[in-house]
Amino acid sequence: MEGTKLKAALLTWLIAAEKAHCFPRVGTAVGSILQSTAVDSATSFETQYPPSNSESRLLIPESHPVYRVALQHDGHSSQQPFPNFDVAEFIDGLEDLLSSASTTVSSSTTTAGSVAHTAQTPPGTTVAQGPVTTEISLPVGPDHPKTMNGQDIFQPVATGPIPANIKSRDDHPVKNLHVNTSDPLSTNKFYAGLFLGTQTNATFTQPYSLAWSKGGGSLKSWGMGISHVQPGMLAFGPENRKIPGNPVQYYINPIGLQHLIFSATELNQSSVMDTEQPTAFSANAVLKRSPGSAQQITFPLVQGMGYATAVYNELEPLIESGVFFRKVVSAGSPRPGIFKYRVDIEDDTTWLLYATPADGKDPKFKLVSKSSLRGPEGFSGTIQIAKNPAGTSGEKFYDNSSGVYPTTGHISGSVTGDVGSYSLSWTKAGKDVAGTPLLMFALPHHIQSFDKATQGRITNISLRTTTKGNATAVIGESWTMVEPNLPVDIGFAPWSPTHGSAHELSPAAQQAILEIAPQELKQNISKQTDLNSMYYSGKALSKFATLVYTVNQLGNNVDLATNAFQELKKSFANFVQNKQQFPLAYDTVWKGVVSTAGYSGDLNQDFGNTAYNDHHFHYGYFVQAAAIIGSLDPAWLAENKEWVNTLVRDAGNSVANDPRFPFSRSFDWYNGHSWAKGLFESFDGKDQESTSEDTMFAYAIKLWGKTTGDASMEARGNMMLGILGRSLNNYFLMEEGNTNQPANFTANKVTGILFENKVDHTTYFGANLEFIQGIHMLPLMPHSPFTRRKEFVRQEWQAMFAENASTPASKVDGGWKGVLYANLALIDPKASWEFFAQPNFNYSWIDGGATRTWYLAFAAGLGGA
Ligand SMILES: *[C@@H]1O[C@H](CO)[C@@H](O)[C@H](O)[C@H]1NC(C)=O
Ligand SMILES: *[C@@H]1O[C@H](CO)[C@@H](O)[C@H](O)[C@H]1NC(C)=O
Ligand SMILES: *[C@@H]1O[C@H](CO)[C@@H](O)[C@H](O)[C@H]1NC(C)=O
Ligand SMILES: *[C@@H]1O[C@H](CO)[C@@H](O)[C@H](O)[C@H]1NC(C)=O
Ligand SMILES: *[C@@H]1O[C@H](CO)[C@@H](O)[C@H](O)[C@H]1NC(C)=O
Ligand SMILES: *[C@@H]1O[C@H](CO)[C@@H](O)[C@H](O)[C@H]1NC(C)=O
Ligand SMILES: *[C@@H]1O[C@H](CO)[C@@H](O)[C@H](O)[C@H]1NC(C)=O
Ligand SMILES: *[C@@H]1O[C@H](CO)[C@@H](O)[C@H](O)[C@H]1NC(C)=O
Ligand SMILES: *[C@@H]1O[C@H](CO)[C@@H](O)[C@H](O)[C@H]1NC(C)=O
Ligand SMILES: *[C@@H]1O[C@H](CO)[C@@H](O)[C@H](O)[C@H]1NC(C)=O
């Protein structure tokens, strides 16, 4: 299979350095200058970043970084995101269909007797035959009574053991060498760089990034480096002239910058780093002088933390700077027992340092060189640093919250009617902890949805994040966000924000569906679903479940789909019995349910499923298929619910105290979307490509919750959809006027792959425009119009897929053509309908994970017919 292809391309920028600054030897009113560093500097230079640490040089490393733009595959295969089947193999009778079809598909040449029967049934009449007794309908429109009242969204999915068919294994190919815990491990969170591989890649708490220097970098430090990248430091890719506005293909933050480093003179190559107390929102990195030593620095790393905090135990602090100190000023005690320093470094930024010694004594830091600020021997206590872009007004906030720090985060939430509310809160530690408020950074989508009380605590301290626009400091221990328009009424039927669910299609649409469906129902379901990939198999199960639903409920013909439905249940059972080609295993090392495909030496098998890549994508399709099967045949649930719930617990567990699975493996409740990358060490952190398959998981658990009567899961799915709608619109699906991504990037309309450290308008499987945009479209499902807003879809279509654009949909080949035209239904359902209903339809336009029948129903339900 495909190996890890590393298309290493290094771009080196050789930029003339700015004229050096002069550093006056004058005191300030607030304190005294520890040491000044007036040195003339070169006006230009050529060098590789990181530069060597030459004391005679006053260079600004930020002027000449090496940026890494390689796209590493990390288990993300270069295969297309859908299985490929030979269409000719299953579409027999195609000729008949083509000769008889017209845009209204009114004849019934290919339909079976049962179809003719249904065609005579008035639309809307429930055909009470066959296995279906349940009405699959959710309240339609905003006036209907809501099903949920103040529903807690974090009730347990299940608490039982792993299904007996899934055997445990303790030989996971990725060893856990650096995390000290027996709890389930979050594999896809922002701090995986602490414990994977070299342990030197960054942890992205936003707005700060931290990375263990481990003897590397320009200073060869053994401490923990802190980086905050200014906008001017970004590197931009080449322009894409196929897209109006000629956007740049990518932007990337330089890596390896060490604005400040928390170290200690005792650290050296005997030192080790452990990860302790990992949760979904935090982890402690612990740098120990040597293995087992109590002389250590603990870094409580929490998403959004306002300061980088280091808790020292019995070490001589060494604060270093790879950008070099310009001036360090002792700035008194903002509060009793806390000692402040104002630190200017050579990139013209000002940082604040707060030391809180355990013994209360003035630590008297000394600037011993341009790169070293030294504290007292045997120091125990806390040192915090923060970058202050907001002058005196910012400093007041930092002073007021100094000495305390968050240790971990919590989430809670509930849904009432169609209003969801969730809160992020933090436990804190430090000096005078009870009376001192936290200062935490919020992302743009948080700020937008803050409730009134939280809004009142926003400051004007703003620091850019690596890939999500500006973060803003907020005072306090918790924030509450409100999502006012949750799509609670989306069910299995096509849905639009203006008309709700279309449970009844027009007679013409019904008839067309019933004429097309028999061809597609003839596919060999067991063959197409029994694949060597959980991803492709799940897609195929989802496709057939959706087809059966469409015929059964939208076509109002139960009989026509009966055989396929039985076949579908048999195929699903293959997985529940764990008899698929690569069975699932319960991995006791990291704790989760993984494909065994990657145990044989190639971790990239099945898109890296074994190493926890993409679980929400893969399992979301199974869960959606199960939701349909279970609602059409409630008796099916008894034997299958436990297995499906196991997939939900693995990819999106709802509680933090389940001994078998971590909380919310994929969805990141701080970032507001999921991360797909699992246990692969990465320069650029976690990433996600397919936002539409992220929303598919939320949609799937919403409907599975509905089907199984798990009101908490249903509400959680609704909440996740609400949050995704907002976060995607802010960061991934860029309408005109988006200010969170760089101005010359937004015309790409979609991010492509968004990493924690870079954004690259491409895919893992190729750079065709229809791939890059299309992987944010598929699968087209009832929730698609909710997360892909009309205005966005219109702009994207005009810029890229309209007849006058570079890549007209009409000229795109293969399954992607079907994806584009199904997406067109979101803005022009009639054109979409006409495309799928055309007499000379070519089945090569339908990908292996979709059906023409559903696409027709989808376009019709949105008003196309
Ligand atoms: C894990 O950490 C705890 C607390 O920090 C410590 O007591 C224990 O010895 C550590 N265990 C290992 C295996 O390092
Ligand atoms: C590193 O420090 C340890 C003490 O923490 C010391 O025993 C050891 O000799 C040092 N190693 C080197 C190579 O300096
Ligand atoms: C922040 O707001 C304060 C008033 O609350 C104002 O005095 C100050 O100038 C602002 N600072 C910045 C950097 O905008
Ligand atoms: C400063 O902290 C006090 C509590 O110690 C809090 O009441 C006040 O709101 C804080 N002020 C600012 C400006 O953050
Ligand atoms: C479906 O495919 C399977 C496996 O390839 C095969 O054994 C079976 O005979 C096929 N069924 C039909 C009806 O062709
Ligand atoms: C980061 O991860 C990459 C990929 O595994 C690895 O090659 C590199 O050494 C790591 N560390 C740094 C600082 O780049
Ligand atoms: C982000 O902050 C910078 C200043 O740091 C400011 O120039 C820019 O306009 C801000 N962007 C937005 C979208 O507010
Ligand atoms: C993109 O914009 C940045 C400033 O935000 C600029 O530095 C860069 O040169 C631009 N790149 C191109 C190709 O226009
Ligand atoms: C195509 O034409 C429409 C107007 O009909 C225009 O809005 C759009 O910008 C054009 N697209 C391209 C790529 O020129
Ligand atoms: C359908 O499209 C495929 C791929 O472009 C082509 O090879 C085939 O001839 C087409 N079939 C018909 C009936 O036009």
Image (cartoon, rainbow, N blue to C red):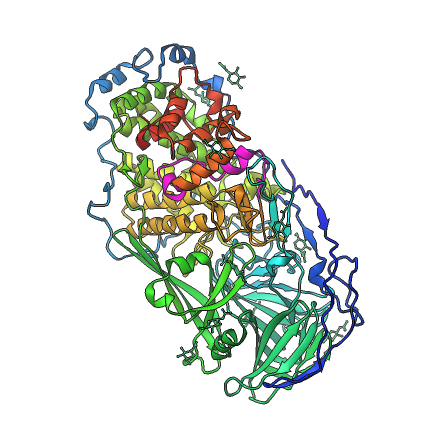
Quarter placement of the C terminus: top left
Residue closer to the observer: 809 or 186: 809
Horizontally, is 689 left or right of 573 in the view? right
- Residue 753 position, x and y percent, is 55, 45
Q: Quadrant of the N terminus?
A: top right
Q: Which residues are magenta?
A: 761-789
Query: Residue 681: image x %, image y %?
Result: 62, 53
Q: Is 30 placed left or right of 455 in the picture? A: right
- The residue sitting at 75% across, 76% down in the picture is 38
**Principal secondary structure, stretch drawn in magenta:** loop
Q: Quadrant of ligand 2?
A: bottom right
Looking at the picture, tell me which residue is in the foreground, 830 or 782: 830
Q: Position of residue 373 (x, y in %)?
A: 68, 78
- From the viewer's perspective, is residue 292 above or below residue 102? below
Tag count in the figure? Answer: 0
The answer to which quarter of the image holds residue 703 is top left
